[in-house]
Image: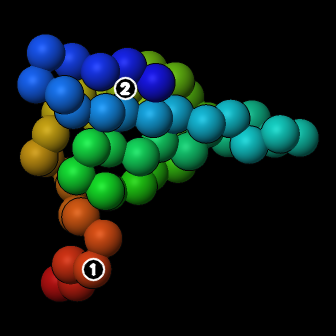
Amino acid sequence: MSTGPTGEIYRVDWLPGTDVLHGTCHCGAEHTSQDPVEMWEWMLGHPEGHRPRGIDS
């Protein structure tokens, strides 16, 4: 977990027994991926590709 200068928290958890990473952005959006580079690109590309929890379209 890292905290940037604005206090935004990004979290990436490894799901044991798999090759899957589960990321949670500071806005509450969640994403899973097997590729760590793709995961960080998704997180740092905010808000592109992000949908905070509770937002349906």
Observer able to see residue 1: yes
Q: Position of residue 14 (x, y in %)?
A: 68, 35
Measured Cα–Cα span from mark 1 to mark 2 = 23 Å
Quadrant location of the C terminus? bottom left
Which residue is pictured at 32% across the width and 57% down the height?
29
- Which one is in front, 43 or 28? 28
Between tags 1 and 2, which lies in front? 1
Name above or below for residue 49 compared with residue 20: below
Most distant residue in the bottom direction: 57
Q: How far from the left and from the top, in percent, is residue 21?
A: 61, 38
Compared to 41, does 23 lie above or below?
below
CA neighbours of label 2 inside 10 A, class few (<14), some (14 to 19), many (20+)? some
Q: Is residue 38 visible?
A: no
- Image coords of residue 8 (percent x, y): 21, 32
For marks 1 and 2 on the same chain, the one whose residue lies earlier in the sequence: 2
Residue 11 is drawn in which quadrant?
top left
Q: Circle 2 sits on which residue?
A: 40
Tag 1 residue: 54
Amino acid residing under circle 1: Gly
Q: Secondary structure at mark 1?
A: loop
What residue do we see at 32% from left, 44% from top? 25
Considering depth in this image, is 48 or 23 the residue closer to the camera?
23
Could you tell me which residue is drawn at 29 percent across and 21 percent down?
3
Residue 51 location, quadrant: bottom left
Label 2: state its secondary structure: helix
Viewer-nearest residue: 2 or 34: 2
User: Of the residues shown, which amino acid type is indicated by label 2?
Assistant: Trp
- Seen in the picture, residue 47 relative to 5 is either above or below; the reply is below
